[in-house]
Image (cartoon, helix red, strand yellow):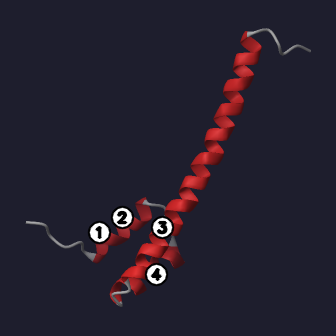
């Protein structure tokens, strides 16, 4: 049997996903009004924002790896 999510559980999940203050309130308002499309839009926008951040961080890691590689090959000199 699948139980329904409580408001407390929903808020905890939103916080864990990176939602803060106003965005939590906006999501809860949509949730209470049964505006599923708006809920999904907010979740999708947050997901896209997090994914953009991950991609930026991955690029930074790639740059660091490249420098380590170049140093290992002796190609970075003073």
The reply to whether the C-beta atoms of the residues labelled 1 and 2 are less than 8 Å apart is yes
For mark 3, give the secondary structure. Answer: helix
Instruction: Compute the Cα span from label 3 to label 1.
Output: 19 Å
Residue in the picture at 46% in, 81% down: 25
Q: Which of pointers 1 and 4 lies earlier in the amino acid sequence?
A: 1
The tag earlier along the polypeptide, 4 or 2, is 2
> Of the residues under marks 3 and 1, which one precedes in the sequence?
1
Q: Which percent across, then down, holds residue 31?
A: 36, 83
**Gap in Å between the C-alphas at discs 1 and 4?**
14 Å
Q: Are marks 4 and 2 in contact (CB under 8 Å)?
A: no
Q: Which residue is mark 2?
A: 13
Query: Which residue is labeled 1 in the image?
Result: 9
Residue 2 lies, with reference to residue 34, above or below; the image says: above
Q: Which residue is mark 3?
A: 44
Q: Is residue 52 left or right of residue 9?
A: right
Furthest residue in direction left, as rendered: 1
Dot 2: what SS?
helix
Query: Callout 1: 10 Å neighbours few (<14), some, many (20+)?
Result: few
Question: Residue beneath label 4, please?
Answer: 25
Quarter that holds the N terminus: bottom left
* Vertical relation: 30 (above or below) 43: below
Question: Label 2 to label 3, Cα distance in Å?
Answer: 15 Å
Query: Few, some or many C-alpha atoms within 10 Å of disc 3 (few <14, some 14-19, many ≥20)?
Result: few
Q: Residues within 10 Å of mark 2 (few under 14, many from 20)?
A: few
- Which residue, as the protein is rendered here, is positioned at the far bottom? 33
Q: CA separation, marks 4 and 3?
A: 16 Å
Q: Where residue 53 sits in the image (x, y, percent)? A: 61, 52
Which element is circle 4 on? helix
């Amino acid at each position: 049997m699948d139980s329904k999510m409580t408001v407390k559980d929903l808020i905890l999940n939103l916080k864990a996903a990176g939602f803060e203050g106003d965005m939590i309130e906006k999501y809860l308002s949509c949730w209470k009004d049964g505006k599923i499309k708006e809920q999904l839009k907010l979740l999708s926008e947050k997901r896209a924002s997090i994914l953009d951040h991950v991609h930026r961080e991955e690029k930074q890691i790639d740059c660091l790896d490249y420098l380590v590689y170049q140093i290992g090959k002796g190609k970075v000199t003073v």
